[in-house]
Amino acid sequence: MNKKILWISFSLLTLIFVLGIFGLVSYKSAKKVIEKFEADFKITSQSEYFKNLASMLGKNNIGMFEKKKDGLTFNVLNIYDKDDSDSLLEALKQKDKEKFIQLKDKLQFLNQGNSIRIEKFYTFEDLRSLAKIGLFFTKTNTLESVRKLALFIKARLDIHQNENGADDVFINTISQSVVETYCVHFKNESVISLGELQTFTLIYAEGNIKGSLTDYIAYIIEKSRKKESE
C-alpha cells in the first residue's frame, strides 16, 4: 500500500515538474514574441504611410475589408454625413438587408474612400506553438488582443471562398479600446445576409508599448498591404 502511495506521489510530482518546465518555457517564448512585436511596431509606426493611415482611421471610424475575384482590399469609408454613417451602422447592427442595400446604392461606399490592396492578411501566424500557448496564459498583453481581432477578420474573409461568395468585414471603432465588426455575405456580388455583431476590446497592458486602437489596426493593414511604389 505504501509503495502504491509513493508511486502515485512520485508520478504527481513528476507531472507537476514537467508542466512547470513546460509553462516556464512557454511563458519565456511568449515574452520574446511580445518584445519582438513591440520593437516591430515602433519601427513600423515611424513610416509616413502608417501615420497617414492611422490618421485616416482616427477621423473616419468605419472601415471595410472587401474580397473580390481580383483580390482583397481595405477601404477607409469617407461618409461625411453623420446621419448616413449612423444609418449604415444601424442597418448592420439590426441585420436589415434591405436597408443595407439601399444605403449601399446611395452611398456607393464599396467604391469610395482610400483603397489599399492587401497582399497577404497578417495574423501573426509565424508564431511557434510554445509562444501561442504562452500568449494564451499571458492574456493581459496587447499582442494577444490585436491577434484575436486579426484572426477573426481573416477567418470571416476566407469562410466562403470556395462557394463563389465572399464576406466583407466592416469595422467600427467606437472608442480607443473597443472595435465592432460586422460581416456581410455576398454571392455573385449580391447581398445574401448580414452577420452578428462581434465586439473586440484592446488590452492596454502595463509595460507594453503605447498605441491607440486605430494604431494597431493600421499596423495590421500595413503588415498586410501590397507594397507598391509610394
Image (cartoon, rainbow, N blue to C red):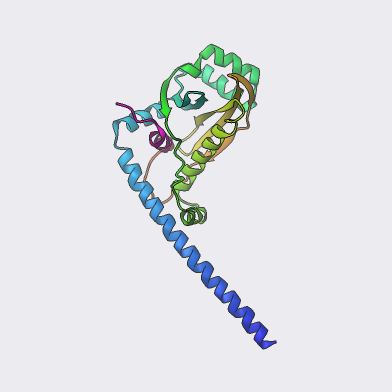
Residue at (40% x, 31% y) in the render? 225
Q: Which residue appears farthest toward the bottom when viewing the image?
A: 2
Q: Which residue appears farthest toward the top when viewing the image?
A: 106
Q: Give the quarter of the figure containing the N terminus.
A: bottom right
Question: Compared to 130, does 230 lie above or below?
Answer: above
Q: Give the quarter of the figure containing the C terminus.
A: top left
Question: Compared to 194, does 224 lie above or below?
Answer: below
Q: Nearer the viewer, residue 112 or 197?
A: 112
**Dominant secondary structure (helix, strand or loop) of the stretch shown in magenta:** helix
Residue 41, given in percent of the width and then of the height, sits at 35, 42
Residue 209, given in percent of the width and then of the height, sits at 36, 46
Q: Nearer the viewer, residue 138 or 187?
A: 187
The residue range painted magenta reads 214-230
Residue 120, given in percent of the width and then of the height, sits at 44, 35
Residue 119, given in percent of the width and then of the height, sits at 42, 32
In the image, is residue 224 part of the stretch drawn in magenta? yes
One can see residue 207 in this view:
no
One can see residue 160 in this view:
yes
Residue at (38% x, 31% y) in the render? 54
In the image, is residue 219 part of the stretch drawn in magenta? yes
Compared across the picture, whether 115 is left or right of 199 comes to left
Compared across the picture, whether 229 is left or right of 222 comes to left
